[in-house]
Image (cartoon, rainbow, N blue to C red):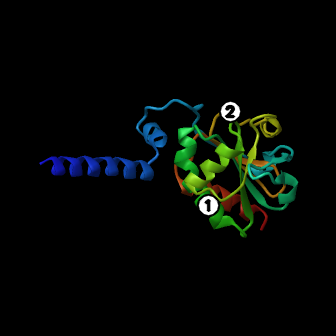
Amino acid sequence: MRFRLLATATLAVAALVLSGCTSDPLAEEYLNGGNTNYISGDGILEVPEADRAAPISFAGQTDAGEPFASADFAGEVLVINFWYAGCAPCRAEAPDLDALAQQYEGNGASFVGVNIYDGAETSLAFARKFGVTYPSLLDNKTGEVRLAFAGEIPPQAVPTTFVLDAEGRIAARILGQLQERSILDTIISDVLAEAS
């Protein structure tokens, strides 16, 4: 009897440990409506080509210690995602963003994250945990990247995703969590088609 109880308890603990490896409690809490550890925002703004403002220029250092400059992506669509590790909707949208980044790699669009709160170790740990393969800039100390976007169409919420056209102008902003991968996919495709 004692052996049976011990075996049952061991299996229960193992199940809890394994379930912890396959889910993200913060993202689960957010999806169930119980987490407010983020700045809320919802909405998609697309800017017609004729109405776009001046190009956005920014630079910084990635969480891997590499230099990054938006100027290096001239002539290409650039998708910028503002995020931080403790943001539940950022965690929820990470797989969709990375899937699109891989889909468009070498096809005219690149992705970069902008981590607004965390240091390099936390940012890299997030990338490993959620399988994010594109780089993230660290903007937690200077705020320079956020400042570059503070003109006509500021981020205003976390997460926020911008799509810059081939000239570096804001073509679209998704305020809040990306609800469907197809939304951003369509926006990127439309902006890529403008150059054709």
- Secondary structure of residue under mark 2: loop
Q: Secondary structure at mark 1?
A: helix
Q: Position of residue 90 (x, y in %)?
A: 58, 43
Classed neighbour count for the residue bearing mark 2: other residues with Cα under 10 Å, few (<14), some (14–19), many (≥20)? some
Q: Nearer the viewer, residue 124 or 162?
A: 124
Marks 2/1 in contact by CB < 8 Å: the verdict is: no
- As drawn, the label of residue 100 is 1
Question: Which residue lies most toward the left here?
Answer: 1
Amino acid type indicated by mark 2: Gln
Mark with earlier residue (2, 1):
1
- Is any part of residue 183 visible from this angle? no
Q: Which residue is mark 2?
A: 156
Q: Residue 181: percent from the left, percent from the top?
A: 55, 55
Check the picture and name the quadrant holding the C terminus.
bottom right
> Which three-letter amino acid code belongs to the residue tagged 1?
Leu
Residue at x-position 56% and y-position 52%: 129
